Amino acid sequence: KAGVTQTPRYLIKTRGQQVTLSCSPISGHRSVSWYQQTPGQGLQFLFEYFSETQRNKGNFPGRFSGRQFSNSRSEMNVSTLELGDSALYLCASSLGWGDTEAFFGQGTRLTVV
Amino acid sequence: GQQLNQSPQSMFIQEGEDVSMNCTSSSIFNTWLWYKQDPGEGPVLLIALYKAGELTSNGRLTAQFGITRKDSFLNISASIPSDVGIYFCAGQDYGQNFVFGPGTRLSVLP
């Protein structure tokens, strides 16, 4: 059974640009959560999607948005990139909303220059 | 907002030793989780705790959900080199939100 797949693995963007990250959950999982991981702030929850609807949102500015498609794949978008957005972005999938049995992907390492 | 504290921040131990780490919060959680993250990988769920006072084992790992619902600890017995990594605790509140601790970095000396 394939795990959680995040693409791309690495990305370099310039300040002011926007970026879209993709996450394919484990087959059969309908919930996808996104996290930002930085050395200074640790793992911080961005948002969770279930059945194409955002169910929970963390404390991030509106520049961070996401969506989920009918096949449960999810994308995360960050607009007007800032240097502080450089981080490892992790996606986790689970069967249902708020399910504790969440499986993480390897992440997308975003560097903003 | 909710915050979790983990201690120690880092530790160096000899192979074969037992390890203890804990996680505390000023808020109550209804679920406690422990994850391990290896370099270049996403966190992997080790143990999930659902009830105050619950003690759960997974191989050489044992974790407990504190009675006050504000803390949890993780023990690793007879450490081996592959135990190296960062251990995160996470709490899930009644709003289904997850909060992660800053992590404990474990290094094992041969």
Image (tube, rainbow, N blue to C red):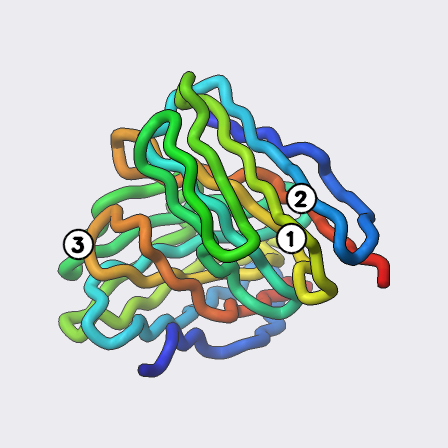
Q: Is the residue under label 1 in contact with that under label 3 (CB below 8 Å)?
A: no
Chain ID for label 1? B
A97 to the left or right of A75: left
Q: Nearer the viewer, mark 3 or mark 1?
A: 1
The quarter holding residue B80 reads bottom right
Chain of the residue that carries numbered disc 3 in the rendered image: A
Q: Residue at image x 61%, y 40%?
A: B102
Residue positioned 67% across, 58% down in the render: B85
| Helix, strand or loop for disc 3 | strand
For label 2, the residue is B104
Q: Is B58 placed left or right of A23 in the picture?
A: right
| Disc assigned to residue A53 | 3
Type of amino acid at the residue the image marks with label 1? Ile
| Residues at discs 2 and 1 in contact (Cβ within 8 Å) | yes
* Residue A96 place in picture, x, y as percent: 19, 55
A47 over B27 or under it: above or below: below
- Quadrant location of the C terminus of chain B in the rendered image: bottom right
Task: Quote the CA–CA distance across marks 3 and 2.
Answer: 34 Å
Q: Chain of mark 2?
A: B
The residue that mark 1 highlights is B86
**Same subunit under labels 2 and 1?**
yes
**Looking at the image, which residue is at 68% across and 49% down?**
A39
Disc 3 packing (10 Å; few <14; some 14–19; many ≥20): few
- What residue is at 29 percent from the left and 67 percent from the top? A74
Q: Is residue A59 visible?
A: no
Which structural element holds mark 2?
A: strand
